[in-house]
Image (tube, rainbow, N blue to C red):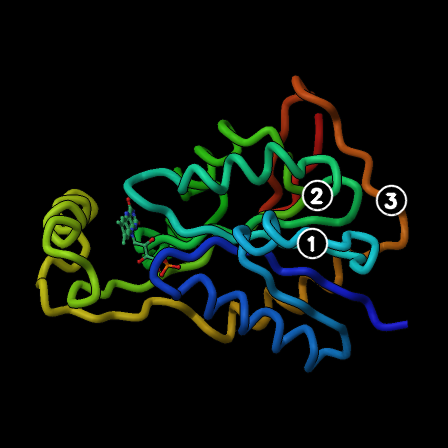
C-alpha cells in the first residue's frame, strides 16, 4: 500500500506553496501519495487525518518569526500532528548560506522550536526567494534592513530564487522514509530536553 503524505503550508507570497508542490511531486514520483493544503484551507474545510500516514508542515520566516496563523494551527492541531510521523520545514532567505541551511545553524528553526507546542519529529531548513519587486515599498525597506544585517541582497530590483529544488525533492523522499509503521509517541509539554541530530531528526534525552 503506498504511503500517503499530507503537506500543509502557509505561504505569504507563493514560494512556500511552490516548495510544498515540489515535495508532493517528488513523493508521487517515489511511489507515494501526496496532498497539499494551505493552513487556511485545512482549518476552514477540515482535514481527514485518517487518510494520511505522514504529515509535513511548512512556513516562511517573516520578520524574524512566523505568521500567527502557523502557531494558532500547530496549537489547535497538535494532537493529530503528533500521532503520526511528522516534519516541519521553514523557508527563509538567511538559509542561502550553508551554515544557516542547517537545523542547528538556523536560528529561526530554533525560534520555532521554542515557541511551538508541537514537537516536530523531523526538521528541514529550506532557502527561500528574494523578490523585491513583488513586495510593497514599506516591506522592501524593512527587508532591505534585514538583508543589510544578514549580508543579503539589498538591490530593490533583485529577484533571486535561493531554493535548491533537488534538495526539496530529496526532502519529499525523506518524508516517505519517516514511516516506520510504529505510532509516534511524543512527550507532552514540558517535555524532556531535545537534541537535534544532523539529519534533522529530533531525539529526546
Ligand atoms: C514581509 C517579509 C518578511 C521577511 N522576513 C524575513 C526574515 O526576517 N528573514 C529571512 O531570512 N527572510 C525573510 N523574508 C524572506 C522570506 O522568508 C522568503 O521570501 C520566502 O521565500 C517567502 O515565502 P512565501 O512566498 O511562501 O511567503 C521575508 C519576506 C517577507 C515578504
| Residue 183 found in image quarter | top right
Q: In screen coordinates, is 15 left or right of 26?
A: left
Measured as percent of width and height from the top left, residue 19 is found at 48, 67
Q: Which mark is residue 183?
A: 3
**Which tag, 3 or 2, sits closer to the chain's start?**
2
Q: Nearer the viewer, residue 85 or 49?
A: 49
Give how far apart the Cα atoms at labels 2 and 1 are. Answer: 7 Å
Tags 2 and 1 touching, CB below 8 Å: yes
Query: Which residue appears at 15% of the width and 69% of the height?
Result: 158
Q: Which mark is residue 55?
A: 1
Dot 3 crowding, Cα within 10 Å, few <14, some 14–19, many 20+: few
Which label lies toward us, 1 or 3? 1
SS for dot 2: helix
Query: Which residue appears at 37% of the width and 56% of the height?
Result: 12
Query: Which residue appears at 64% of the width and 47% of the height?
Result: 122
Q: Residue furthest bottom?
A: 29
Which label lies toward us, 3 or 2? 2
| Residue 118 found in image quarter | top right
The residue at which mark 2 appears reads as 81
Measured as percent of width and height from the top left, residue 52 is found at 78, 58
SS for dot 1: strand
Q: In this view, does 84 lie above or below 177?
A: above
Query: Which residue appears at 75% of the width and 72% of the height?
Result: 33
Q: In screen coordinates, is 15 left or right of 140?
A: right
Measured as percent of width and height from the top left, residue 145 is found at 12, 45
Q: Residue 161 carries which label?
A: none
Q: Quadrant of the C terminus?
A: top right
Q: Is residue 185 above or below residue 171?
A: above
Give how far apart the Cα atoms at labels 3 and 2 are. Answer: 12 Å
Amino acid at each position: 500500500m503506498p504511503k500517503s503524505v499530507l503537506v500543509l503550508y502557509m505561504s505569504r507570497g507563493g514560494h512556500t506553496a511552490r516548495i510544498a508542490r515540489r515535495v508532493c511531486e517528488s513523493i508521487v514520483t517515489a511511489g507515494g501519495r501526496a496532498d497539499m493544503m494551505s493552513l487556511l484551507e485545512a482549518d476552514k474545510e477540515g482535514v481527514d487525518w485518517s487518510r494520511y500516514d505522514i504529515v509535513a508542515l511548512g512556513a516562511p520566516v517573516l520578520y524574524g518569526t512566523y505568521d500567527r496563523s502557523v502557531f494558532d494551527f500547530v496549537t489547535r492541531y497538535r494532537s493529530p500532528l503528533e500521532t503520526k510521523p511528522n516534519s516541519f520545514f521553514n523557508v527563509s532567505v538567511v538559509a542561502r548560506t550553508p551554515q544557516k541551511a542547517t537545523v542547528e545553524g538556523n536560528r529561526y528553526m530554533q525560534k520555532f522550536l521554542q515557541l511551538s507546542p508541537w514537537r516536530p519529529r523531523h526538521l528541514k531548513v529550506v532557502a527561500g526567494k528574494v523578490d523585491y519587486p513583488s513586495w510593497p515599498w514599506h516591506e522592501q525597506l524593512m527587508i532591505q534592513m534585514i538583508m543589510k544585517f544578514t549580508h543579503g541582497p539589498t538591490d530593490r530590483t533583485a529577484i533571486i530564487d535561493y531554493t535548491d529544488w533537488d534538495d526539496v525533492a530529496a526532502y519529499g523522499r525523506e518524508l516517505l522514509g519517516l514511516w516506520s509503521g510504529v505510532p509516534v509517541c511524543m512527550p507532552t509539554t514540558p517535555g524532556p530536553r531535545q537534541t537535534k541530530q544532523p539529519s534533522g531528526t529530533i531525539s529526546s534525552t
